[in-house]
Image: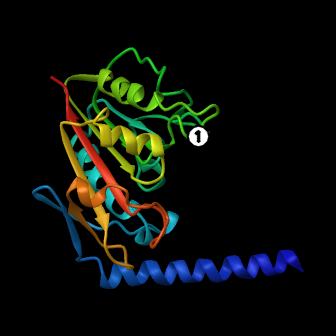
Amino acid sequence: MIMERSMRKLARLTRRNHLQLWYYRRYKSGEKFQMGDREYDYFYHRRNATWVNERAIEIPIVWSYVSRFRGRRVLEVGNVLSHYFCTSHDVVDKYEKKKHVINEDIASFSPKCGYDLVVSISTLEHVGWDETPRDADKIPKVVDRLRQLLNPGGTLVVTAPLGYNDYLDEHFRSRRIRFAEQHYLKRFSPNNRWREVAWEDANATPFDRFYVHANAMVIGIDQAA
């Protein structure tokens, strides 16, 4: 009986997700958000119901870079993009077990060759926080490691939510972590619309309150010399 109720509930949720996905693709596909001087389409996908969370903005931003660097050496830290696209770049993820994923801690990852592009989608906030023991100093060390993995002229693109990891938020406040180009995007409506804001407007934004999951994101971009 319990199993039957669970199956019926799952079926209702699946139907609702299909309807929501159809609605957003049909009626919202023309809507865009802006970061810097560029506009992006919101990203709608049934996996993780991206129309209700930060995936709607961080995936199109990062995927635009990956697309531009196709055919070159690309590393993704945290296995995200392969759930949405056909990918062929290297992926390092300490925990997710997949055939194409290198299961190593990025802090000690040491490839034979560097990368022209390194990207990471909502992974940095877990570093040193969702680990035992917690380690506030691990995050800036990992950011430095990501920079070290770049070839000359290479690009680093990182997305991370504010309000999830107290250590990470404090590193941004104190500027211990600082990217050459740093953008802040904040959610401003129940239907998951975002706009770029100043740090003062993004700082101290709560996670998973008012709206589900992240309500403010940091997009960090660096260029190797």
Q: Relative to 27, is 96 on the left or the right? A: right
> What residue is pinned by disc 1?
98
Q: Most extreme residue toward the right, as rendered?
A: 1
Indicate how the structure is coloured in the image.
Answer: rainbow
When asked about the image quadrant of residue 205, the answer is: bottom left
Could you classify mark 1 by the number of other residues whose Cα lies within 10 Å: few (under 14), some (14-19), or many (20 or more)?
A: few
Mark 1: which amino acid? Lys
In-image side of 218 versus 102 (left or right): left
Q: Which residue is drawn at 60% across and 36% down?
A: 131
Residue at image point 36% right, 64% down: 56
Q: Quadrant of residue 32?
A: bottom left
Residue 30, image x, y percentages = 23, 77
Residue 104 in percent (x, y) is at: 54, 27
Q: Residue furthest left?
A: 37
Is 190 on the left or on the right of 188, as rendered? right
The residue nearer to you, when weighing 149 against 212, is: 212
